[in-house]
Image (cartoon, rainbow, N blue to C red):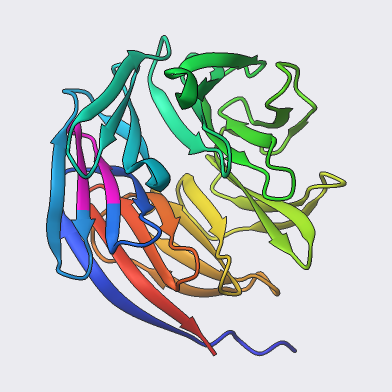
Amino acid sequence: MAMPLKLQIEKVFIQTSERVKSVDFHPTEPWILATLYSGTVCIWNYHSQTIEKSFKVTESPVRTAKFIPNKNWFVCGSDDKFIRVYDYITSEKVKDFEAHEDFIRCLAVHPTSPFVLSSSDDKLIKLWDWEKDWVCTRIFEGHSHYVMQTAFNPKNINTFASASLDGTVKVWNIDSSDEKFTWEAHSKGINCVNYFMVDDKLYLITGSDDYTAKVWDDESKSCLKMLEGHTQNVTAACIHPELPIIITTSEDETVRIWDASTYRLEVTLNYGLERVWGIAYKKGSNEVAFGCDKGSFSVKIDSF
């Protein structure tokens, strides 16, 4: 019988605020980028426990933002259908433009090229090129409901997966508007999708309104494991790249940490910030951040 994974979890930072819809780590600075339902984007310093900078970008909820560190930018998308780009050093707005016909749910930054993917309640995914003044270079159409998240494939960075409330995951190539593959992944809407690698083999994880997360073999598209235990919609899910753990978050107000080898539930966290909406991890680190209804928090996780 496999031994339980021994985890030590240290709370590093907690910041109460309006609802935080997404979080992102800066790769080198001690910063968490947080998007608020109030229309504000904050950079929180988790070492000094202070707000580094705050940007009132709109009166609408901001659901997603990502750092673009090599440009000293962050890019955010909001319910007013706009994408906005800011220089986080000078605090100047670099660009803003209406990107979709409905709420923007997610932004994904390409790992090497000057591209950003946006996904929306208008059921579309769009590819933007910042070296061409943020022109839309491709539109991906095929989902029949809101597109909640996209994720680039770490093994083939010109392909990506998308998750939708239509219950499907679709796989695309940035060079074509035609989907490469689609499958019915959950019985209800899918809120999140992420890739991960184990021993050079590619997998995906999805989280759904059916209260479950699922681990998928990318090659066969077969479900390897369904993670059950949440009592409300699963809002975010990922495998940590440095630690042998799966992390899921939910509207049941909990974060659950699972053994990535045995899929056993190891720890359930609840810091009293109500529903949990997003996860971010810092590459090369054991730090993980979460966005919640009443703020955000970060933890350090060690495994033994």
List x then y, in percent, for residue 272: 23, 62
List x then y, in percent, for residue 303: 52, 84
**Quadrant in the picture for the C terminus:** bottom right
Name the residue at 45% across, 72% down: 285
Residue 282 vs residue 253: left or right? right
Is most of the magenta stretch helix, strand or loop? strand
Residue extending farthest right: 220
Decide which of 169, 75 is in the foreground and name it.
75
List x then y, in percent, for residue 15: 17, 59
Residue extending farthest top: 101
Residue 183 vs residue 85: left or right? right
Q: Total label count?
A: 0
Q: Is residue 294 visible?
A: no
Decide which of 274, 195 is in the foreground and name it.
195
Q: Is residue 149 magenta?
A: no
Decide which of 109, 113 is in the foreground and name it.
113
Name the residue at 29% across, 55% down: 32
| Up/down of 191 relative to 300, above or below | above
List x then y, in percent, for residue 170: 70, 30
Residue 230 vs residue 296: left or right? right
Name the residue at 61% across, 25% down: 166
| Up/down of 243 relative to 79, above or below | below
Residue 113 vs residue 269: left or right? right
Q: Quadrant of residue 13?
A: bottom left
Q: Quadrant of residue 39?
A: top left
Name the residue at 57% across, 44% down: 111
Q: Is residue 36 magenta?
A: yes
Decide which of 115, 210 is in the foreground and name it.
115
**Quadrant in the picture for the N terminus:** bottom right
Q: Which residues are magenta?
A: 33-43
Q: Is residue 271 visible?
A: yes
